[in-house]
């Protein structure tokens, strides 16, 4: 009786349990990598947005910032100078006409030249306008939220951001970096797999997470995923 019970009930349950453990051991890293890739996609977009805003901030101020609040204030209240090119410098007739016009009226403004251009004058010039940052950057992204830039997605921890100015070949070069360590970005996923990932990255001399820019050496504000 005991032998039959073992053969028909206990043994199948043991086999099912072993199969489950084997399948789970295979699927656990698969699910981890799927979630990792998904979270990285969201995080990379956020770091790209930070880079875009930092570069616009530097264009207007001459330096980067380590303060998210400064970036948010710049986005909400700052302006970007936009240069609109009218005509082409390769158009010799437009260049001649423009030179002649400026000789006749040295104080003519770009706006006055634009009015003449609209009336059919063949000219080449540029107009500079100050446009609110929020009307220029990310205006095609209805889901963009500047307040979210302060946080690492999926965990709520603050993004790590630094800025500095370094001498490179005798020239002051503004630098910045923003980073999201995996220990925060992948919070809630399998911790041992995350520890293994960190160790693998560190063993190969790579940052254990996502990072854009660098405060140690110029890298054209590249992301470590690029």
Image (cartoon, rainbow, N blue to C red):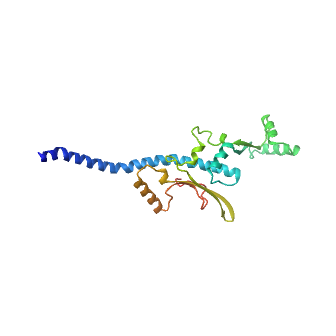
Q: How many marks?
A: 0
Would residue 147 be found to the left or right of residue 195 on screen? Answer: right
Residue 2 in the image, given as x and y percentages of width and height: 13, 47
Please provide percent x and percent y for residue 153: 51, 47
Q: Residue at x 56, y 51 (%)?
A: 159
On the image, which quarter does residue 78 sit in?
Answer: top right
Residue 125 % position (x, y) = 77, 44
Provide residue 209's location: percent of width, then percent of height. Answer: 50, 55
Residue closest to the far top = 119
- Compared with residue 51, is residue 138 higher up or lower down, i.e. above or below? above
Residue 95 location, quadrant: top right
What residue is rendered at 26% in x and 47% in y?
17
Q: Residue furthest left?
A: 1
Asked if 205 appears above or below 50 in the picture, the reply is below
Q: For the point 83% across and 46% down, which residue is it?
A: 99
Q: Residue furthest bottom?
A: 170
Picture quadrant of residue 1: top left
> In screen coordinates, is 219 left or right of 83?
left
Camera-nearest residue between 152 and 63: 152
- In the picture, measured across the screen, residue 39 lies left or right of residue 90, that is left
């Amino acid at each position: 009786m005991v032998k039959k019970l073992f053969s028909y009930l206990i043994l199948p349950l043991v086999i099912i349990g072993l199969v489950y453990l084997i399948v789970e051991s295979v699927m656990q890293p698969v699910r981890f990598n799927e979630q990792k890739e998904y979270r990285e996609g969201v995080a990379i977009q956020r770091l790209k947005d930070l880079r875009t805003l930092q570069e616009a901030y530097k264009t207007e101020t001459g330096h980067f910032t380590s303060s998210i609040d400064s970036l948010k204030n710049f986005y909400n209240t700052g302006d970007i100078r936009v240069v609109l090119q009218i005509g082409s410098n390769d158009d010799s007739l437009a260049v001649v006409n423009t030179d002649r016009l400026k000789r006749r009226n040295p104080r003519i403004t770009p706006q006055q030249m634009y009015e003449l251009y609209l009336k059919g004058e063949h000219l080449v010039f540029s107009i500079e306008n100050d446009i609110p940052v929020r009307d220029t950057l990310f205006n095609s992204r209805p889901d963009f939220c500047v307040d979210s830039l302060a946080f690492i997605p999926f965990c709520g921890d603050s993004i790590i951001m630094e800025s500095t100015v370094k001498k490179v070949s005798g020239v002051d070069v503004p630098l910045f970096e923003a980073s999201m360590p995996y220990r925060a970005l992948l919070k809630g996923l399998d911790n041992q797999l995350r520890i293994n990932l960190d160790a693998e990255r560190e063993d190969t001399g790579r940052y254990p997470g996502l990072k854009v820019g660098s405060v140690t050496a110029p890298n054209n504000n590249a992301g470590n995923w690029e």
